[in-house]
Image: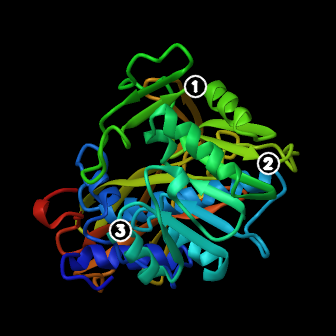
């Protein structure tokens, strides 16, 4: 990812996140035309200076949510599983799937030619050209798992039904499709068509026609009805399971049997919110959260190069609210007090790691300026803390 357009401080933060996640072989290269990066670059969405980290973490989340859903039904990505990722874009999720699957068991598919070329070149997988018409797409063989993150959230009804049928014909005998949709609860959803389906011919995409790639909102029961009409034997779902925004569905070619309860995926969040100082003393604070309210964060730590600092985690509180601003998590505040040795000078990456009984993840990384004792993430806003 040694790109000239990535500030040095941000490059150090990304490298530290990758180290703490054990992802030393993960590509950090993000194509400059990737609309998913542009989509998280709006200041109202993420803290300025964390756009690339957010991009990488949301791709990681999609792969984690996929694995978690498969495990609930006794499946996984171990050999000989063969996986198709439809609508892979420029590889936000592909880079994470590629770590789990060798190139000969992972096939990608994408409608934007530049994106398909980038994915094939950067991640060493076959990337089949897509088309708005599902009947016009030809990929090799059948698949045990087909993953479709955020395509069905953009299709008009006729294409929605067409792609369901096309994917059903591409499944192995006991295969599953895992896909996501927007719910009708979203404030921007237009009036439904009377059958739990609404489509708006407009989206965040600058390269795809709105009548073919708009924004779709659909009730889970209608997804299940359409899937069964397309030949799927079973349909299960969890609402707002992906990115706390999209409903996630598992469609089985055969009846699905739960190997364990399908609970929320162990997605962890958190922030280093602020720093106060006096002399060489500093106080740091923030929060950590688990998307599974019954699996709260038990420990949190700050990482400064080779130094690990345990922080005081307050008792968790359960937060749940419904649409239009849904939230489901167990959240805890944390704080840390330290006296800095004189040897700590200059700038360094400061990372926050959260841990539950079953998961551990680096959830935030900021740049700390020891000379001025403040947090700085965005070179354009040097005084921000």
SS category of the residue bearing label 3? helix
Real-space Cα separation, disc 3 to disc 1, in angstroms: 32 Å
Write the residue at 31% across / 60% down: 37
Q: Position of residue 152 (x, y in %)?
A: 51, 42
Q: Position of residue 312 (x, y in %)?
A: 53, 55
Picture colour scheme: rainbow
Q: Which residue was labeled with disc 1?
A: 219
SS category of the residue bearing label 2? loop
Write the residue at 55% across / 56% down: 62
Real-space Cα separation, disc 3 to disc 2, in angstroms: 31 Å
Write the residue at 37% across / 64% down: 53
SS category of the residue bearing label 1? loop
Q: Residue furthest top?
A: 194
Mark 1 residue crowding within 10 angstroms, few (<14) / some (14–19) / many (20+): some
Write the residue at 23% across / 48% down: 43
Asked if residue 310 can be seen in this view, the reply is no
Mark 3 residue crowding within 10 angstroms, few (<14) / some (14–19) / many (20+): some
Q: Which residue was labeled with disc 3?
A: 113
Q: Position of residue 243 (x, y in %)?
A: 50, 46
Q: Earlier in the sequence, mark 3 or mark 2?
A: 3
Above or below: residue 320 compared with residue 2: above
* The N terminus lies in quadrant: bottom left
Hey, which quadrant is residue 281 in on the image?
bottom left
| Image disc number at residue 253 | 2
């Amino acid at each position: 990812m040694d790109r000239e357009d990535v500030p040095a401080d941000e490059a150090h933060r990304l490298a530290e996140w990758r180290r703490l996640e054990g992802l030393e072989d993960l590509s950090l290269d993000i194509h400059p035309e990737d609309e998913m990066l542009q989509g998280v670059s709006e200041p109202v969405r993420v803290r300025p200076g964390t756009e690339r980290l957010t991009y990488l973490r949301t791709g990681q989340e999609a792969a984690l949510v996929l694995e978690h859903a498969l495990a609930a039904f006794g499946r996984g990505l171990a050999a000989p599983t063969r996986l198709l990722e439809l609508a892979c874009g420029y590889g936000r999720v592909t880079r994470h799937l590629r770590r789990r699957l060798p190139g000969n068991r992972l096939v990608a598919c994408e409608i934007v030619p530049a994106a398909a070329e980038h994915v094939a070149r950067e991640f060493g997988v076959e990337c089949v050209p897509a088309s708005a018409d599902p009947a016009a797409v030809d990929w090799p063989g059948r698949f045990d798992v087909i993953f479709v993150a955020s395509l069905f959230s953009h299709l008009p009804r006729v294409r929605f039904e067409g792609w369901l049928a096309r994917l059903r014909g591409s499944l192995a005998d006991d295969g599953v499709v895992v896909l996501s949709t927007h719910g009708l609860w979203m404030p921007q959803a237009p009036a439904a068509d009377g059958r739990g389906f609404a489509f708006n011919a407009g989206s965040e995409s600058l390269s795809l026609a709105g009548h073919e790639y708009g924004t779709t909102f659909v009730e889970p029961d209608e997804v299940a009805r359409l899937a069964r009409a397309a030949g799927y034997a079973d349909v299960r779902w969890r609402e707002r399971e992906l990115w706390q925004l999209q409903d996630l569905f598992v469609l089985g070619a055969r009846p699905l049997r739960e190997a364990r309860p399908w609970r929320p995926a162990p997605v962890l969040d958190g922030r280093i919110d602020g720093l106060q100082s006096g002399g060489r003393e500093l106080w740091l604070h923030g929060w950590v959260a688990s998307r599974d309210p019954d699996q709260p964060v038990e420990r949190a730590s700050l990482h400064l190069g080779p130094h690990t600092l345990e922080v005081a985690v307050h008792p968790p509180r359960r937060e749940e609210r419904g649409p239009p601003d849904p939230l489901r998590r167990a959240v805890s505040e944390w704080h840390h007090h330290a006296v800095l040795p004189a040897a700590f000078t200059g700038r360094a990456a400061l990372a926050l790691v959260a841990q539950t009984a079953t998961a551990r993840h680096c959830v935030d990384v900021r740049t700390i300026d020891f000379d001025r004792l403040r947090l700085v993430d965005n070179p354009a806003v040097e005084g921000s803390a």
